[in-house]
Image: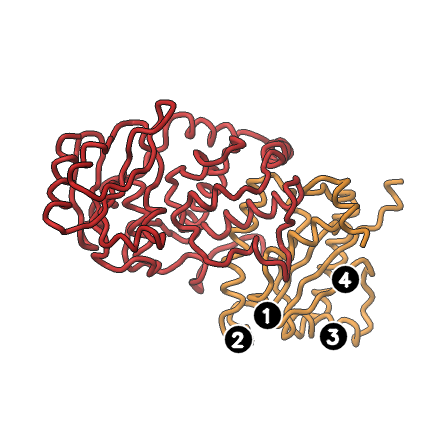
């Protein structure tokens, strides 16, 4: 049973760096795990922590959040604001006991196609070992809610 | 307390203020908020160790503003709250007379600088049981902490008394009343509780002065104050933000420094 578990991973990425980086991974014909569902945002500053909570509540086993390296933001400072938010969010989640090995934060530029493949592969491998994610609320209600 | 009655009488008689927000005798041996509008009622005010609630929550209520200029009886945490409200442009300088009380001392603070000096010299001290709670949780493993918070938050039925009790939770439109997108599930069920309390903590990071009003207000007895205390601790250690000590401080979560440190971003 444990061997057949395939994690569902949601990747929230910024349009200008990581999304382009992931595109480069594809055009470079680098193969990487198909477990990841990429969601594109204009900027990491737009990636609300509520999106992460929503993904975890609705059954994601892992999350990757990725954007431009510091000083490379298309909007100058979106990633700096995002970084501050992640620092607090990560520690708050840990305080509430959530296993934050499931949530990865990274900087991937538009030229780092190989780094993107590497991050996805490592995340999938690690989460496959961790097994399905602990749910942050009542299981039965979650099923009811995701039915529709 | 005599000095407080005298001061309130003077303020109301001289017409310097039209209402005084303070603590009065409540039912069941508890204190409750009272709004004194005539000098004859000044003796209804009490000040003792039952007076924990943060009265700053009433300052901006339209019903109170209609009464005219106000004075407020404030413990050290409430003074910090008022300073934080001024920093967040929720209160203009000199808009309220603060009667800062602690043990047997009474100080009248009217301008920003005296408020700042008072806040800086009067730290908010946790009662021993809160210190113990903080230590107990710190000693738990991650899995035990998860279990602890899941069990605690399961009791929450989304009455939002914590929001109503917090003077710094003043948004007119809150995310929980927003259904596009619906970040927090509506029914009084365990679902959405984790999200709600995480949101509250995130919104109060670097702003919570740790007055404990939310914990007192919670009818389910969840130690929710610990979450915002932790959020403020993170903002303090990571970004050096101490809430409620400066009337022109910027906000922790809407500012940044290029040299913000983290070790977890790959």
User: Could you say where residue B214 lies in the image, as x and y percent from the top left?
Assistant: 44, 39
Query: Is the residue at mark 4 from the same chain as the one at mark 1?
Result: yes
Chain B takes which shade in the image?
red
Q: Which residue is mark 3?
A: A24
In the image, A4 versus B223, the foreground residue is B223
The residue drawn where x is 27% and y is 39% is: B22
Question: Judging from the image, what secondary structure is the residue with disc 4 in?
Answer: strand
**On screen, residue A44 above or below B212:** below
What separation in Å lies between label 2 and label 3 (alpha carbons)?
22 Å
Mark 4 or mark 1: whose residue is earlier in sequence? 4
What separation in Å lies between label 1 and label 2 (alpha carbons)?
8 Å
Letter of the chain that mark 1 sits on in the rendering: A
Whether residues under marks 1 and 2 lie with C-beta atoms below 8 angstroms apart, the answer is yes
Colour scheme of the picture: by chain
The residue drawn where x is 68% and y is 41% is: A137
The residue drawn where x is 51% and y is 51% is: B202
For the C terminus of chain B, the quadrant is bottom right
Question: Judging from the image, what secondary structure is the residue with disc 3 in?
Answer: helix
Which disc number belongs to residue A75? 2
Mark 2 or mark 3: whose residue is earlier in sequence? 3
Chain A takes which shade in the image?
orange
């Amino acid at each position: 049973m444990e061997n057949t578990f395939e994690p569902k991973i949601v990747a929230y990425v910024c349009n200008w760096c990581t999304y382009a980086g992931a595109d480069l991974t594809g055009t470079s014909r680098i193969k990487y795990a198909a477990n990841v569902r990429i969601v594109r945002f204009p900027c990491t500053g737009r990636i609300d922590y509520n999106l992460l909570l929503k993904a975890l509540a609705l059954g994601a086993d892992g999350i990757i959040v990725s954007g431009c390296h510091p000083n490379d933001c298309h909007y100058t400072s979106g990633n700096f604001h995002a970084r501050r938010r992640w620092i607090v969010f990560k520690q708050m989640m840990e305080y509430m006991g959530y296993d934050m090995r499931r949530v990865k934060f990274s900087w991937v530029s538009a030229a780092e196609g190989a780094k993107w493949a590497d991050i996805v592969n490592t995340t999938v491998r690690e989460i496959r070992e961790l097994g399905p994610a602990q749910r942050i609320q009542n299981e039965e209600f979650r099923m009811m809610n995701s039915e529709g | 307390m005599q000095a407080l009655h005298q001061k309130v009488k003077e303020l109301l008689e001289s017409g310097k203020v039209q209402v005084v927000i303070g603590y009065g005798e409540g039912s069941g041996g508890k204190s409750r908020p009272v709004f004194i509008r005539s000098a004859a009622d000044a003796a209804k005010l009490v000040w003792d160790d039952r007076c924990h609630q943060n009265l700053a929550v009433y300052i901006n209520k339209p019903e109170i503003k209609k009464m005219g200029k106000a004075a407020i009886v404030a413990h050290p945490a409430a003074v910090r709250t008022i300073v934080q409200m001024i920093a967040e442009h929720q209160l203009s300088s000199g808009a309220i007379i603060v009667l800062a009380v602690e043990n047997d001392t009474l100080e009248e603070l009217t301008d920003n600088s005296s408020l700042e000096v008072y806040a800086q010299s009067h730290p908010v001290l946790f009662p021993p049981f809160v210190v113990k709670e903080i230590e107990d949780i710190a000693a738990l493993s991650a899995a035990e902490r998860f279990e602890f918070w899941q069990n605690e938050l399961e009791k929450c039925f989304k009455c939002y008394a914590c929001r109503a009790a917090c003077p710094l939770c003043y948004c007119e439109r809150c995310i929980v009343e927003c259904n596009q997108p619906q970040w927090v599930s509506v029914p009084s069920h365990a679902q959405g509780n984790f999200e709600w309390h995480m949101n509250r903590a995130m919104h109060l990071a670097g702003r919570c002065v740790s007055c404990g009003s939310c914990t007192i207000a919670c009818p389910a007895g969840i130690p929710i104050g610990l979450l915002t205390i932790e959020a403020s601790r993170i903002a303090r250690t990571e970004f050096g933000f101490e809430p409620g000590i400066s009337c022109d401080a910027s906000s922790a979560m809407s500012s940044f420094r290029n040299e913000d440190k983290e070790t977890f971003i790959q």
